[in-house]
Amino acid sequence: MALEREIQVEHRVAGGDGFARLRDGRAAFIPGAVPGDKITPKSFEDKRDYVRIPTWDLVEASPDRVTPACRYFGSCGGCDWMSQRLTAQLRSKVLILRETLQRVAKISEMPEIETVASEGLGYRRRTRLHVDAYGKVGFHGPRSHELVVVEECLISTHEISDTIGLLSALSRSQRSALTCLEGIEIRHAPGAVPCLVLLAKRRQSSARAFKVLTAAGFQVAVEDGAEPERWPLDGGLFLQAAANSFTQINWGVNVELVRAILAGAESRACQQFIDLYCGIGNFALPLAAAGLTGVGVEQNSEAVRLAAAAADEQDLDSLKFASTSVERWLSDRDMASSAAPSTADLVIADPPRRGLKEVASAVAKLASRYLCLCSCDPVSLGRDLRVILDEGFELQQIVLFDMFPHTHHAETLVWLARS
């Protein structure tokens, strides 16, 4: 079926594609298109209920279209929104979040979505390079595993970007030494000099790569052998993070996220908390430092060990940890800690992308007064919210944190109160 010659892009949708409504009523999804663009399709995939237009010509540019700052835009698979003005990106993310929550959670009325913006460049403090069988290093291309060799990354800190350039040069002169690696992660904790270069090895030993990189002046460790680093928060507080620990890549916005949690708990006069999927204590440690009593639940035993060590070193005696999955902790409290409360006036949940899924109802029952959800996926957030609202909660506040500028991703914080 032929499409109209010119199509006006209306807005973006979850997943990042541009969206347009065709004259026959079908939806059209257009990767890379900016809202306000007018395009001519070059190819399309007819899916009966919708159309995907993977290639197209730009007829008229949107007022929000800009020239991407990165020379690798389009060939590198990251930063899929860099051709859209940064302020317009934030508007698009708010629209996607609102539409998704209305559709998935069936919310007809919701609070105004607040936003926390970010610097567009130099924010990323953790990135992972891929290494191919020939020892070349780089990122994957869009929706593929094809390696794109890069010499810089503008959204990363200057220190990480410079390290990428040095690694790229080294891979040209010492390529055979890197073939034993499948990936190289670069971490730059605030205040750390230099960056930490973590080696992910293939089946064979990474000893040669370790030797070559160390001789070149890099601070090198294998992923399972790196010493923990300190990641600072407000008030002199710090987290301990090892190589396999999850830390937010945008630490400046993460600090704002933690501040929002603390301000929300203080304004609601919360005294006890349960922090589910607590990781290395990103929320739990600051809440304990603010005087609350709580327990953190986390499946990763190494993350729990680091969180407990950081709490002990900072004299946060009111904080306990349970090293078990949230599902198991909910079904059998004896597997957690004798100090674990049956309920708390504040429950915080920061699950992985899949969300709470089957435990959403049980999590809601834990909260005697307030529930705070942190999510990186609007669809799973909407599904979980529907269950929680049906458990007798009402929406109080929604804040979108632009944790990942120039991409379609964002972090959302939702406060709910028991009706």
Image (spheres, rainbow, N blue to C red):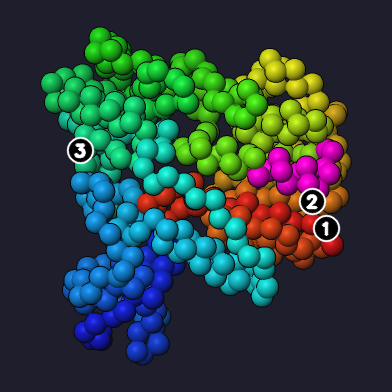
Q: Which residue is mark 1?
A: 418
Q: Of the residues under marks 2 and 1, which one precedes in the sequence?
A: 2
Position of the N terminus, as image quadrant, is bottom left
Q: Amino acid at mark 1?
A: Arg
Q: Residues in magenta?
A: 260-272
Which residue carries the number 2 mark?
Answer: 370
- Left or right, 280 with reference to 405: right
Q: Do the residues under discs 2 and 1 have CB atoms within 8 angstroms?
A: yes
Q: Image point 63% across, 65% down: which residue?
A: 112
- Look at 84% across and 62% down and name the residue there: 419
Name the residue: 68% across, 15% down: 313
Q: Position of residue 398 (x, y in %)?
A: 64, 58
Residue position marked by numbered label 3 in the rendering: 149
At 54% from the left and 70% from the top, the residue drawn is 99
- Dot 2: what SS? strand
Marks 2 and 3: CB-CB under 8 Å? no
